[in-house]
Image (cartoon, rainbow, N blue to C red):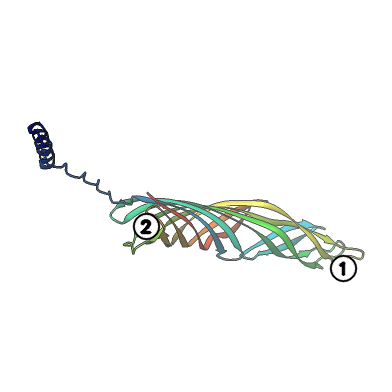
Amino acid sequence: MVTPRLLSALSLVCLSVVAVEAQPRPAPAKPRPVRPFVEHGFITLNATAQASAADLTDRVLFNTNAETGTIDARYPGKTAMLADVTAGFRVTGRLGIALGGSRASSSGSASVSADIPHPFFDNQHRQVEGTATGVSRTEIAAHLQLYYDLRPKGPWRIRVFAGPSYFDVEQEVITEIDAAETFPYDTASFRSAGTARAKGSGIGFNGGADIARMFTRRFGAGVLIRYARGRVDLDAPESRSVSTDGGGLQAGGGIRVLF
């Protein structure tokens, strides 16, 4: 049997439920807006190959047996392995300034041709020809670049650049040869060559393009194609000067970082 007290209790419960349901529910929290990534600059790390611009030739004069002999050496241009790092910062719009540094090293051979005076007779030089191996060369370069970023195409980034370059070159050059000869000394044969380090620096230019594919907003991989060239006068032994070209065509790839 339903009593008045029970009816009153049920009524109070129903009124409480209705009051709770009638209260306004709190609005859902708005998600924080995602800030768009604005590119200010980049860093690239590359491993590339450099094709030397040209061969290097050199002539050495020496005195022996009261006459003057000559040594002509030819150092073929060869491909060198090159490590490169570049950092750039946008100045305005899509224009920016970058500074890069690279180091290339190689080791190869040099062809040698020498005229050696006869120990007994004047004007009867013996001709000697041979090949010197293990001739090394090192180039360190700094590249200042004005660059332009093309408008991005999805994950792809393309940058073109040009500017001046500074080259510091160290090259082994032939200074003497060791020839085998026996009485009556009418002929001689090449045995080995002695070398010394020649160093020099010079100014040139660089230009090229960098193509990258970004895997995230900040990290990706890319390809570098650059041509750099500069004339360098090497200070060789005996107060000689040897002219060479620094740089060459460079192609390779590596890591790309945007910031």
In the image, residue 42 above or below residue 7: below
Q: Nearer the viewer, residue 98 or 241?
A: 98
Q: Nearer the viewer, residue 63 or 132?
A: 132
Q: Position of residue 175 (x, y in %)?
A: 71, 55
Quarter of the image where the N terminus is located: top left
Q: Residue furthest right?
A: 183
Name the residue type under label 1. Asp
Name the residue type under label 2. Tyr
On the rendered structure, is 179 left or right of 219? right
Q: Position of residue 78 (x, y in %)?
A: 61, 64
User: Which residue is tagged 1?
Assistant: 186
Disc 1 secondary structure class? loop
How would you rate the neighbour count of disc 2 (Cα within 10 Å): few for under 14, some for 14-19, many for 20 or more? many
Query: Which corner quadrant of the image does residue 217 belong to?
Result: bottom left
Q: Position of residue 28 (x, y in %)?
A: 20, 45
**Residue at coordinates 33% horizontally, 52% vertically from top-left?**
39
Disc 2 secondary structure class? strand
User: Which residue is tagged 2?
Assistant: 147
Q: Position of residue 187 (x, y in %)?
A: 85, 68
Q: Residue furthest top?
A: 5
